[in-house]
Structures are given as structure tokens and as C-alpha cells.
Image (cartoon, helix red, strand yellow):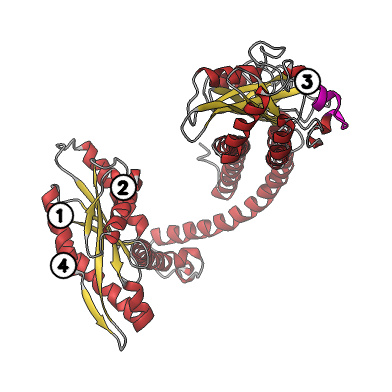
Amino acid sequence: MLKDLRITKKFPAVMISFTLASVAITGIIAFRSASNELKKASQAKLSALLESRKAALENYFNVIEKDLEFHSQSPLVVSAIEKFIDAWQQLPEKKEAYLKQIYIKNNPFAKSQRSAMLSADDNSPYSLTHQEYHPVLRSLISTRSFYDLFLIDPQGNLIYSVAKENDFASNLLTGQWKQSHLADVFNQVNANPQLGRHCYADFAYYAPSDEPASFIATAVFDKQKNYLGVFALQMPISPMNKVMQVTAGMGESGETYVVGDDLLMRSDSRFLADGSILKTRVDTSSVHQALDGYTGCQVIKDYRGIDVYSAYCNLDFQGVRWAVLAEVDKAEIQQPVYAMTRFLTASGLVIVISIFVVGYTISRDIANPIVSMTKIMNRLANNKLNVEIEVSERQDEVGNMAKAMIVFKQNAIEREKLQQKLIHVARHDTLTGLATRNYAMEQLDKLIENFEKQDKPEDELLAVMFADLDNFKRVNDSLGHHVGDELLKDIARGIEKTIKQMGIAARIGGDEFLIILSECNTIQSIENVARKLLKTIKKDFSTLNESFQVSLSLGIATFPKDSDDSISLVKKADMAMYKAKKSGKQALYWFDETLVKN
């Protein structure tokens, strides 16, 4: 191909053609790669925002559960429900009508402010009890942003509420609201009252409040464990909205929202002005996937019929599952891709023209010396030995190539030495020369993996020792840090000498060491090494005011007996070491499950 074309024309043509082809191919690949990476980055960001919202919701519901459990067991609530039950029984026969008359109809405050009424002026035992407990219970729900708080006796009588809505004083078994979600959670608790058992009802329209609400309830017991009644909290939608309507990082078209198993929204959309809770139906594949327990990100048409990137996951709370979604319009995510397309097209034209001009000039500059060298070679071939070879005197890349390769080789050798030194520094403690924590954990993971692959007998063990020096702080305080440093070096040498080739030793803190025994496979051999360490690592110190001894406390955990992962093994060895410390120092302790329970 082009064999008859002179090199002064062939070389520029080939060079420019291949350069243009390379630029075109590289540009296409770069564009596709950048486009894919941009989409992946957008999906990753969307998924991260989704996880952030989910974590915030989980934290919100965990706080509610803790509040419910704490207050239901508090002496205040126990005393309140006891006194309200007693006061309820002393009311006139038509209790519901009586209480609604004095606390709702005669309430001087507006409906939303009825809780401001401290007590009715009938001087009944109920009103006196209400006057005693209402300020505290009202403060409780306002502090935690609950909508209402209820005390319900075992017969279903709603004997107290903070908000004094129309459900107050009604009976949840036989009254007007017996089909409500509040009645549902009461019935669940009342049917099987247990300490610490919580029952939850998902968000639904609640007529007395005239808005969506959910309820969570638990049983209340006295000091003798006698069941007194039910403590319930009404949760408004606003806290969930507050979490889900954070727009930071969502761009112009992004939003996060929650959908229930009935496919209705549990939080308001930022794009629907009239509110969407329990109104807007979201029947998309992302919602179904999330409700089925899956997590992911995909392109779908959302509830508005707009193409969006949709990240989804599920949130479970007390037997109720929601789909949590984070979505951004596809057009917004792909906007940078469109901008990049326009930029690459314009810049590509400029590059093509530049390559043609510069490539032709450079290729001619390279081709001309080749032509000159060809003429010289032809003259030599004709035995004209007196020809002056000017090429040998050139100081350009041709003449410097051999020297450059030598330099590159020397640089490569030095670079390899430096790399090995940096690896050693990264893996070893600068003071003691022992392994670092990260390197030791990497080796422990590899040992566990090899141990599992070899399918060793159950009685063969891999030991992890967590060691801490006793009285080391006194060395630093009394004799100075330089003495402490020398002591640490000496102890490190002692540990290495004791374990020899049986494992790995690492310094993981000021005076804390991690020892991994891979060649001691029995309890007895592990204990022998541990005892030898206790005997070896022991040094006496004296000052003008005191004498003390630096010794070692050891905790031991084994794989696979105590745990099957490295982090848990180290944690359990640490727990055992603290037990050894408490038992008198200079001791060793094997991990057992009683440490976790305690």
C-alpha cells in the first residue's frame, strides 16, 4: 500500500491520517465513557441522597420508639394512668358526654388550642388529676413534636388526651371511633399486653384530627407488673415531610418521597401545591421493587408521566413497609451530556484543522532527515567511504535515545526502591517496627480466608490476642516520653522474639498491641505462648516517690470458635483484655459470651 509513493509525501499522509483516526476514535470513546461515568455518578449521588433520607427517617422512628418506651415506663405516666382510671370511675354515669361538655364544648380556646385549658372548674377528682398531670404531658408532646398523647384503660375508655379532639372520652371498643387506626393499635396492645412490645398503625386519614396521622402504642404496667392500660402517641405527617422535602443536592427537578403499600404518598411532593399525602397514587416499577424489598436505580416514568432517574429502597418499621424514592428528571441529569456533545463537536473541528497543519509540518521535518540518511547509505553502498555522516553528530532524539534509555533505567531502579520503602513504612510502625493495625487486619483477613478454604478440623484454631501494657502511663508521667518510647521498642522486640515465626505482631495504639497466631492451632499451644508473653513482658521501674512494674494484660479470641470475621475477633479479644485488666492486671483472659451479656 502506497509503496511507490515517495516518503516525503507518504509519511505526512500516513501520520496525519492515523492521527486523525486516533483522535476521532479517542474522542468517541472518551465521550461515551464520560457520558456513562456522568450517568453513573448521578445515579450514585441519587442513591447516596436516598440513603441519607432513609437514615434520617430511621433515626426519627427510632427516637419515637425510645420515647414511647421511656415514657410508658416512667413513674409519671404510671402514676397518671392510675389516677386517671380512679378519677374516671368517680365520674357521673354518662362519662363521655360529661367530659366532652366541660373539656370540649365549654373550652374557651379554639379547636387547635384546646390543650391550653389546664382544667375544668368542676372540682371533680378527674379535673384535679387533669390539673396535676396535664402541664407535664402537654410539654412532653410539644417538646417532641407529637400531635397528641392518649391514656386508655383496658376497657377501651380514652380517659385522657392532650389535644382534646372529638375522640376524647370515647370508647375505642364500642364508640364512634372503634374502626379507627387508634382503635387498631389499642386492640393489638390490649389483646396481648407485654412490656416493651410496641404496636404501630400506618398513616391514614384520621377524622377527629381532620388530617393524616399514624399511631404508636404500648402497654403500661405498675411496679408489681400489673397491666394498667395503654399509652399511645399520635404522630403527625410534618416530621416526615421535613425529612423528605430537603432539596439540597436535588437540583431543579429532584425530590424524595415515601409511598405506602397502598401505593399512596406518605409525604408531600414538592411539585404538587395542594398536597399529595394519601391523595397521589404512585404505581411505578420503582415503588413495587422497593415494596418487594429491593434496592436500585433505574429510568422510569414517574407519577407525573415524566422520564426520571429513580433510586429506590424500602423502610420497615413495626411491621409496616414503605417505599422510599429519590428521583431527578432524566433531562436534567443528561443536560451536561448535551453540553459536552456540543463542546466536543466544536473543539473536534478545531483539533482536526490544527492536526493537519501541525502534522504536515512535523512529518516533513521527520521525513527529510530520513531522506538525507538514505542518500548517505546509498553513497556508502557505492563504496564512497569518505562520506561525512552528519547524522552521527546530531544532538536530537535520535542521538540521545540510548542515553535516555540508560537514564530511564536508572530512574526505574530508584523508583522501585522508593516504592518498596514506602510500602514498608505504610505497613510498619515507625517507632517499634511492628506491623500497623491496617496491615495486621489485612493479614488476618487473608488468614481467615485461607483457613476456611483449607476446611480444617473444628479443633484447629486461629488466635487473636489483644495486649495492653499495665502502668505504662506512669512511665511517661514519671520518667518521660523518651523512656516510654524506649520501653515500647524493648517490648516490641520481646513480643517478636516470643512469637517468632508463629504469627504477626502489630502496634495498634499508644501501648496496645495486636498479636495474631497462625501457627498455634490448639488451646494449649496458644495459652503457652500467652503465658510466655506475660512472663517476658515485665519490667520494674523506680522513682524517688514510688516503685512500679510495667506488665502485660492479654485478651484472647479464636477463629472460628468466637467469631468468623476479623473485626469481631479483635473486638472480642479487646473485651477479654479489659476483663483481664479488671481481674488484677498481668493476666490473660479467654473471651466467652458472658462478656457480651455483661
Q: Which residue is mark 1?
A: 527
- Residue at which label 2 appears: 595
Between residues 421 and 376, which one lies in front from this camera angle? 421
Task: Determine the secondary structure under disc 1.
Answer: helix
Look at label 4 and name its amino acid.
Lys
Q: Earlier in the sequence, mark 3 or mark 4?
A: 3
Tag on residue 535?
4
Say what amino acid the circle numbered 1 marks.
Glu
Tell me the element at label 2.
helix
In the rendered structure, which amino acid carries the disc numbered 3? Tyr
- Above/below status of 91 relative to 440: above
Q: Amino acid at mark 2?
A: Leu
- Which is nearer the eye, 179 or 36? 179
Range shown magenta: 98-111
Q: Secondary structure at mark 4?
A: helix
Q: Earlier in the sequence, mark 2 or mark 4?
A: 4
Q: CA distance from mark 3 to mark 4?
A: 81 Å
Residue 98 is labelled as: 3
Q: Is residue 193 visible?
A: yes
Q: CA distance from mark 1 to mark 4?
A: 12 Å
Q: CA distance from mark 1 to mark 2?
A: 19 Å
Mark 3, secondary structure of its residue: helix
Corner quadrant of residue 216: top right
Please name the predominant secondary structure of the magenta segment in the image. Answer: helix
Q: Quadrant of residue 5?
A: top right
Is 219 positioned to the left or the right of 352 in the image? left
Q: Nearer the viewer, mark 3 or mark 4?
A: 3
At which x and y percent is residue 537?
21, 69
Q: Is residue 235 left or right of residue 193?
A: right
Q: Relative to 300, say whether 525 is above or below.
A: below
**Rounded to the nearest whole Å, what is the CA distance between mark 2 and mark 3?**
57 Å
